[in-house]
């Protein structure tokens, strides 16, 4: 089997720097909100082109903190996609609000901006587009709808940190954004981690307070919050990894380009991923779609090629949410995607030979 993701070459390349950075934290002992946290937050501010950035404990906590910052209450409605990782809708429901699902675009799998406005009611508070597989949704259109109806846009950028949309960086293309540094994400740490971003300084300050139990000043709790901080050690690791990240994005884009070139003759049999002209993708996943997925995956497995499905069951069909949500709109594209998508091996240090092996194995399925 070739690996689906192999992070060992990345560690080998950064080993001395990462080990030293971790050692430094062990030596000074400020494990929570140590100097590495502020330092990495400054780097995030610069990297995203000026979004106020706060490190938090995970992508899931980032969503929670962002929604708490705009005072999401039980009964509120939030428009989002059903075709994402569970956390997006989970946290809406955990706060007692209602995820209102609208369908996705068939080619990018992102929220279909044309279907959002029909879902707006007097209870709607926010729109959460997910930048799935590493590519932003139609953020301009979504921001325009939000402005018209006085809603907040929260980009779930857990898979798209570093991606560009019309020359701007993901995480800085809406009022609020959330990302994840889970190890398998494009930029990953060595445990759980995430960040929230805001174009609004006041909201950023509020999120900072929510991140530490709603504190403003020690033991002065002015609002409800959570324990949502990211460890100093994880920030130390990410500062080292960020140095290599733009090169890694280029590598991921190179792998994606090889896949697309190598598989283009199979178009019609497999649906290749589409990236719009005015943006790019950091390729959190390279995801194709096929009709006979189980058989396809079994054939590839036999040839030593691992695959993975992101995500087989849309959220409106998940047992935990089924009883909480009312489905108001047709979600047939999300359901069809759940049945057809399959992701191929993808990581920055993937050898060209392995990419070719995947392409050849797929070609030999027909
Ligand atoms: C990974 C992911 C999350 C959750 O991030 P964690 O750091 O694992 O909590 C949320 N949304 C999307 C789209 C994700 O891919």
Image: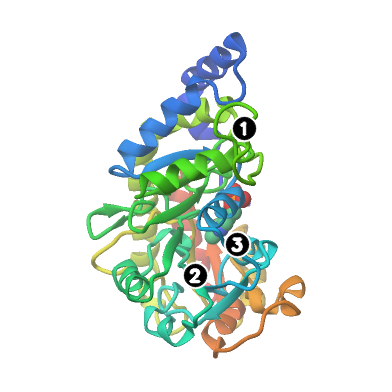
Of 39 and 360, which appears nearest the observer? 39
Question: Marks 2 and 1, Cα distance to the nearest angstrom?
Answer: 29 Å
Give how far apart the Cα atoms at labels 3 and 1 are.
50 Å
| Residue 36 on image: x %, y % | 49, 23
Residue 297 appears at what percent x and percent y?
A: 63, 70
Please tell me in which quadrant of the rendered image residue 205 appears: top left
The residue drawn where x is 51% and y is 69% is 362
> Is the shortest distance between ligand 1 and the CB of mark 1 under 8 Å?
no
Q: CA distance from mark 3 to mark 2?
A: 38 Å
Q: Callout 1: helix, strand or loop?
A: loop
Q: Give the residue drawn at x 50%, y 81%.
A: 122
- Crowdedness near tag 2: few (<14), some (14–19) or many (≥20) residues, C-alpha within 10 Å: many
Q: Is mark 3 within 8 Å of ligand 1?
A: no
- The quarter of the picture where residue 41 lies is top left
Residue 285 placed where, x, y %? 49, 59
Who is closer to the viewer here, 116 or 8?
A: 116
In this rendering, the answer to whether 92 lies above or below 250 is below
Tag 1 residue: 220
Q: Which residue is mark 3?
A: 307
Q: Is residue 246 left or right of residue 99?
A: left
Q: Is residue 166 visible?
A: yes
Disc 2 vs disc 1: which is toward the camera?
1
Task: Please state which of the two labelled residues, at mark 3 or mark 2, is closer to the viewer.
Answer: 2
């Amino acid at each position: 089997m070739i690996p689906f993701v192999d992070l060992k070459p990345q560690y080998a390349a950064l080993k001395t720097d990462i080990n030293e950075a971790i050692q430094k934290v062990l030596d000074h002992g400020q494990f929570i909100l140590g100097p590495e946290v502020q330092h990495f937050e400054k780097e995030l501010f610069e990297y995203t082109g000026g979004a106020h950035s706060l490190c938090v404990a995970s992508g899931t906590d980032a969503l929670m903190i962002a929604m708490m910052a705009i005072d999401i209450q039980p009964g509120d409605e939030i428009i989002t996609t059903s075709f994402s990782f569970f956390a997006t809708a989970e946290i809406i429901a955990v706060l007692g609000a209602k995820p209102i699902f609208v369908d996705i675009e068939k080619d990018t799998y992102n929220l279909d901006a044309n279907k959002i406005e029909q879902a707006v009611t007097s209870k709607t508070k926010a729109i959460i587009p997910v930048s799935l597989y590493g590519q932003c949704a139609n953020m301009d259109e979504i921001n325009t709808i939000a402005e018209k109806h006085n809603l907040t846009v929260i980009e779930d950028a857990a898979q798209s940190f570093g991606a560009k949309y019309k020359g701007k960086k993901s995480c800085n293309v809406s009022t609020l954004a959330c990302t994840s540094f889970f190890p398998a994400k494009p930029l990953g740490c060595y445990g759980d981690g995430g960040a929230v971003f805001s174009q609004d300084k006041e909201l950023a300050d509020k999120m900072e307070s929510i991140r530490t139990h709603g504190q403003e000043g020690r033991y002065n709790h002015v609002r409800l919050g959570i324990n949502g901080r990211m460890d100093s050690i994880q920030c130390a690791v990410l500062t080292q990894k960020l140095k290599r990240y733009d090169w890694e994005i280029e590598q991921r884009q190179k792998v994606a380009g090889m896949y697309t070139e190598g598989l283009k003759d199979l178009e019609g049999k497999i649906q290749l991923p589409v990236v719009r002209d005015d943006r790019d993708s950091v390729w959190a996943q390279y995801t194709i779609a096929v009709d006979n997925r189980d058989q396809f995956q079994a054939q590839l497995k036999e040839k030593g090629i691992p695959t993975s499905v992101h995500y087989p069951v849309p959220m409106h069909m998940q047992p935990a949410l089924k009883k909480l949500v009312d489905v108001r709109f047709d979600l047939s594209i999300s359901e069809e995607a759940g049945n057809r998508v399959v992701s191929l091996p993808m990581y920055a240090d993937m050898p060209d030979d392995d990419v070719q092996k995947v392409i050849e194995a797929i070609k030999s399925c027909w």
